[in-house]
Image: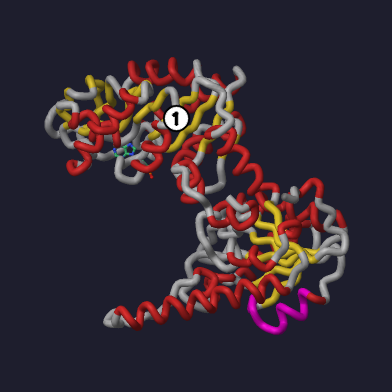
Amino acid sequence: MQIMDNFNFAGQRAFVRVDFNVPLDEKFNITDDTRIRAAIPTLKKIIADGGSVIIGSHLGRPKGVDAKFSLQHILPRVSELLGVKVEFVNDCLGQEAADKSAKLQSGHALLLENLRFYAAEEGKPRGLKEDASDEEKAAAKKAEKANQKEMAKQLASYATVYVNDAFGTAHRAHASTAIIADYFDTDRKLFGYLMQKEIDAVEKVLKDTARPFTAIMGGSKVSSKIDIIENLLTKVDNLIIAGGMTYTFTKALGGKIGNSICEEDKLDLALSLIQRAKERRVNLVLAEDTKIADAFSNDANTRFVPVGEIPAGWEGLDIGPDTEKKFADVIEKSKTILWNGPTGVFEFDNFAGGSKAVGMAIVKATENGAFSLVGGGDSVACVNKFGIADKMSYVSTGGGALLEFIEGKELPGIKAIRGY
Ligand code: AMP
């Protein structure tokens, strides 16, 4: 398989799938350009080699052509960060896109309009009537899959080499993220730097694991984390359960949880996870005390109580000091750490202390040589809030893609390039 550093792009036209799905304000100003910055090293390397780039991305969830989601909004920023004037074509599939790509000079860049203006990108039919019959639905699906192949083929025709640097969409089998790779020989498709870094970080944690390996799973619900927890139970030495999930486990074990968040239909599941951890000799670490509140508010009255002794009318919104210490002891002795999800309602400053304590314990472990991977939505917001993102070994840019990767699923965007 080709890798970026060894590939000479001189004279090549590279189709680079990036994830420029950045947040915009109501005036279409970019409010956070992290995703654009993340793909710049790959684009710069191609240009520095003397190649040219055709940049493809989605933005938002348009249901068709929609000026609100035009990539034209981000064009000036891309030019600025890349340091070259980037051309734009307002239809990713028209003749103009083909002509402009063919004429691209070495060192030049072309940004295509939003790939998701076409339903074929996702390969899912749009605008199906609600009362469509099963046959109609199946026919529409088949037609859109055929369109998807055509779209992938056309995008591929613009370029001599395919680079995927869009980890955020690696879990989607879309025209530009996976199907397109079929139109390039094995030595003409490769991961961009960002994609490679993400893959390396997850594989370092899951496959090339220095022990002890501790995963900290927080967040609100067990139901959204079951697949990850199940996969992690086959890999970790310590599994810390935190956040809203705590109370489902506590109730399942017979504790009193007051008004705390709880999934009543997952009590049996919680017990079976406890059992499975025992069988696999995984040290399952649960909270011992909790910071409770008499309302779901930053200004609520608070108290610390043992986790199974929450009075009626009160709810657990963060871990308590004993638990902070218990978690930190485990984390600080670890050599591999995965953190997904806060220990409490970290958006409220009064309930962010537990997440901060966990973050600081990870910083300490990382300084002592551990490899720490943080990822999945709110955990990234957490490390940013506490100003410790640069003290982690790796902070993933992927939300859903990262979670599916950790669940042990095959990601189409990765498989399309390396075959697994
Ligand atoms: P998730 O998206 O599943 O990772 O969940 C993150 C969300 O869980 C954050 O918005 C937290 O505020 C929320 N959360 C964490 N702990 C609690 C808790 N004890 N009660 C309610 N929500 C919580």
Tell me if mark 1 has few (under 14), some (14-19) or many (20+) residues whose alpha carbon lies within 10 angstroms of its own: many
Q: Position of residue 150 (x, y in %)?
A: 60, 77
Give the quadrant of residue 164.
Answer: bottom right
Give the quadrant of residue 270.
Answer: top left
Q: Main secondary structure of the magenta part?
A: helix
* Mark 1 residue's CB less than 8 Å from ligand 1: no
- Relative to 343, 267 lies left or right: left
Query: Looking at the picture, does residue 256 appear above or below residue 118?
Result: above
Q: What is the total number of numbered labels drawn onto the structure image?
A: 1
Q: Residue at 59% x, 61% y: name it.
A: 177
Q: Position of residue 21 (x, y in %)?
A: 56, 59
Q: Nearer the viewer, residue 389 or 286?
A: 286
Q: Which residue is mark 1?
A: 215
Query: Looking at the picture, does residue 103 appear above or below residue 163?
Result: below
Query: Looking at the picture, does residue 175 appear above or below residue 333?
Result: below
- Relative to 78, 343 lies left or right: left
* Residue 4 falls inside the magenta stretch: no
Q: Residue at 39% x, 27% y: name it.
A: 239
Q: Nearer the viewer, residue 230 or 367?
A: 230
Give the quadrant of residue 311.
Answer: top left
Q: Position of residue 364 (x, y in %)?
A: 55, 19
Q: Residue furthest left?
A: 312
Q: How is the image coloured?
A: secondary structure
- Relative to 182, 133 lies left or right: left
* Ligand 1 rendered quadrant: top left
Amino acid, disc 1: Ala
Range covered by the magenta-colored residues? 91-101
Q: Position of residue 249 (x, y in %)?
A: 24, 31
* Residue 99 falls inside the magenta stretch: yes
Q: Is residue 387 visible?
A: no
Q: Residue at 57% x, 74% y: name it.
A: 149
